[in-house]
Image (cartoon, rainbow, N blue to C red):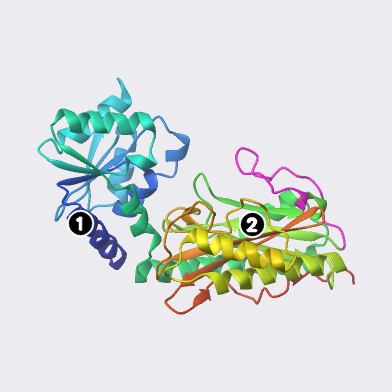
């Protein structure tokens, strides 16, 4: 086991001990990846196929997978015991049957079923009841473990966050020579610059994309269009907003930065960007270990409003990042989660000025007495200026 696996195993063991569990059944694919270091890149696209992990104290994890994934999982992690179920009959029923065949003697079952479909959750609870055993909800415990990072996780997340910021900055540097580019070309070049830094786009949530000019009048979409299809070209004076979500060894970065196709900002761009910078400062000053996410959100909204910064009602101002590019807790009105030391958050600054939306995402580490920005390859107190007026 490497250092990261040892650190995660210790957290999972703590969940098992605190809840006095005989076995912990994990069904959510990100929770499985977190607990076992096994990830199936195509899992989101094959929702009819299910994977389960069974965790017992002082035992190798047991992983139950469809037959077509068996060899891949065995090659991914040699510290787990892999069992495959048949796809010839009812696939989900076959998977659940095998899961409980491997833990039929357990009396206290933990489960993360609050994070999965109601159908699978009910099937798990029904099998536990049939054994005369007790069901313990552990979704919050697992998410709590995921949200506070270990030393090895922090080191890795810092590295990939900085690489992604470097990739965006590196692509922006090419704008000086490239001049007119379509948003589709910008998206592809962002991807290439990520690859050049040994990070890559993988899985359902991965993306790199550029949004330019008047197209930033919308908060661009996610699935199924992702905002990639725009064919508008950069012109002198345009705002360019670049997104990049990259994956390295199962962990994610999530960054957004702004460039201006000019030597300087227009009056409108200057005001909008100043609002973004001020919002970032407000967020960093408001984040404190021990506060609830909703308290931070309310404080930031009040301070931003007093400064005349228009933010989007209901928009979460930040979220956690780890084995998923966007996960809880969220800096939103409804999230009661208490902020803790060693959380790594993406600050999602989004402001509206006149008819346009301006966005910048910063990765920060929460410490006892401070908030450290850990993805500032360059100082983003001002945007990147592409000298396009020569």
**Which one is earlier in the sequence, the residue at label 2 or at label 1?**
1
Position above or below: 9 against 111: below
Instruction: Return the residue at label 2.
Output: 243
Q: Is 59 or 319 nearer to us in this picture?
A: 319
378 vs 148, left or right, is right
Give left or right: position of 312 versus 24. right
Q: Which residue is mark 1?
A: 18
The quadrant of the image that shows the C terminus is: bottom right
Q: Quadrant of residue 136?
A: top left
Confirm whether residue 313 shows in the render.
Answer: yes
Q: Which mark is residue 28?
A: none
Residue in the image at 67% along x and 64% along y: 257
Identify the secondary structure beneath mark 2: strand
- Would residue 266 be seen by someone viewing this image from the given angle? no
Q: Is residue 231 magenta?
A: yes
161 or 123: which is nearer to us?
123
Image location (x, y in percent) of residue 191: 61, 56
In-image side of 28 versus 202 (left or right): left
* Residue 124 % position (x, y): 26, 33
Alpha-carbon neighbours of circle 1 within 10 Å: few (<14), some, or many (≥20)?
Answer: few
Give the percent coordinates (x, y) of residue 66: 31, 33
Residue that appears at 33% across and 31% down: 120
Q: Main secondary structure of the magenta part?
A: loop
Instruction: Point out the stretch of residues depicted in magenta.
Output: 216-236
Q: Residue at x 51, y 58 (%)?
A: 294
């Amino acid at each position: 086991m490497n250092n990261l696996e040892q650190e995660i195993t210790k957290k999972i063991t703590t969940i098992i001990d605190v809840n006095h569990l005989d076995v912990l059944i994990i069904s959510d694919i990100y929770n499985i990846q977190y607990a076992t270091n096994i990830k199936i890149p195509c899992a989101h696209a094959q929702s009819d196929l299910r994977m389960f992990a069974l965790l017992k104290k002082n035992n190798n994890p047991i992983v139950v997978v469809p037959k077509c994934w068996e060899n891949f999982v065995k090659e991914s992690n040699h510290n787990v015991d892999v069992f495959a179920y048949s796809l010839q009959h009812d696939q989900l029923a076959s998977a659940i049957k095998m899961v409980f065949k491997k833990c039929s003697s357990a009396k206290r079952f933990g489960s993360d079923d609050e994070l999965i479909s109601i159908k699978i959750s009910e099937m798990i609870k029904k099998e536990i009841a049939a054994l005369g055993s007790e069901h313990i909800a552990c979704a919050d415990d697992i998410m709590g473990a995921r949200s506070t990072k270990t030393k090895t996780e922090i080191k890795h997340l810092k590295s990939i966050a900085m690489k992604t910021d470097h990739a965006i900055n590196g692509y922006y540097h090419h704008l000086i020579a490239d001049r007119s580019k379509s948003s589709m070309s910008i998206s592809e070049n962002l991807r290439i610059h990520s690859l050049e830094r040994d990070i890559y786009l993988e899985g359902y949530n991965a993306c790199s994309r550029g949004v330019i000019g008047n197209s930033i009048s919308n908060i661009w979409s996610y699935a199924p269009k992702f905002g990639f299809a725009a064919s508008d070209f950069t012109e002198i004076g345009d705002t360019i907003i670049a997104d990049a979500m990259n994956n390295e060894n199962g962990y994610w970065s999530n960054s957004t930065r702004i460039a201006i196709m000019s030597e300087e900002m227009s009056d409108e761009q200057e005001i909008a960007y100043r609002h973004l910078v001020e919002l970032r400062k407000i967020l960093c000053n408001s984040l404190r270990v021990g506060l609830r996410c909703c308290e931070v959100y309310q404080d930031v909204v009040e301070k931003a409003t007093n400064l005349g910064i228009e933010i989007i009602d209901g928009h979460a101002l930040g979220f956690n990042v780890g084995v998923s590019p966007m996960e809880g807790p969220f800096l939103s009105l409804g999230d009661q989660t208490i902020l803790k030391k060693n959380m790594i958050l993406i600050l999602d600054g989004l402001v509206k000025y006149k008819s346009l939306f301006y966005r910048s995402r910063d990765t920060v580490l929460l410490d006892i007495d401070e908030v450290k920005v850990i993805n500032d390859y360059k100082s983003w107190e001002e945007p990147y200026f592409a000298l396009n007026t020569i």
